[in-house]
Amino acid sequence: MNGSFFSNPTFPSTSGINNAISPPGNISSQSIPLEQSLIENILRLNKGKRVRVFASYPDSNEWRDKIYTGIIEESGRDHLILSDSNTGNWWLIRMLYVNYVEFDEKINYNPDYSDTFD
């Protein structure tokens, strides 16, 4: 075969594309890194607030359903870290097991992320 059977692929010109758009994940102008999970971002915006986290462990008979009460220390794409100063306990909870989070005060929420983070 001499390579003439298949033509080389051509790609459309990028001259009409707005080059000012940043690629996903490029958030250098933000002080808090944004992840793609909206729940994680809401938890990050509420760092330091007291919450109750309702979690279920379907493969466990002993810990089928559990409620964690504490302060949001950190939040990641797949985890949440809580602390309880009354008991000295710290928890690393996988988001996979989190059913919902109950807050004791108003939730900071910014769905479009157009405002500047504090």
Image: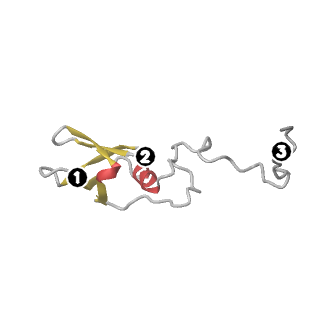
- Tell us which disc is closer to us: 3 or 1: 3
In the rendered image, residue 71, in percent from the top left (x then y), is placed at 29, 47
In the image, 69: left or right of 36? Answer: left
Pick the front one: 57 or 21: 57
Q: Kindly identify which numbered label has been placed on residue 57.
A: 1
In the image, 84: left or right of 12? Answer: left
- Which residue is the extreme one toward the front? 1
Which residue sits at x=28%, y=54%? 51
Q: Is residue 102 above or below residue 30?
A: below
Q: Label 3 sits on what residue type?
A: Asn
Q: Residues within 10 Å of mark 2 (few under 14, many from 20)?
A: some
Q: Kindly identify which numbered label has been placed on residue 46.
A: none
- Asked which colour scheme the image uses, the reply is secondary structure
- Tell us which disc is closer to us: 2 or 3: 3
Report which residue position mark 3 lands on: 8
Which is nearer the N-term, disc 2 or disc 3? 3
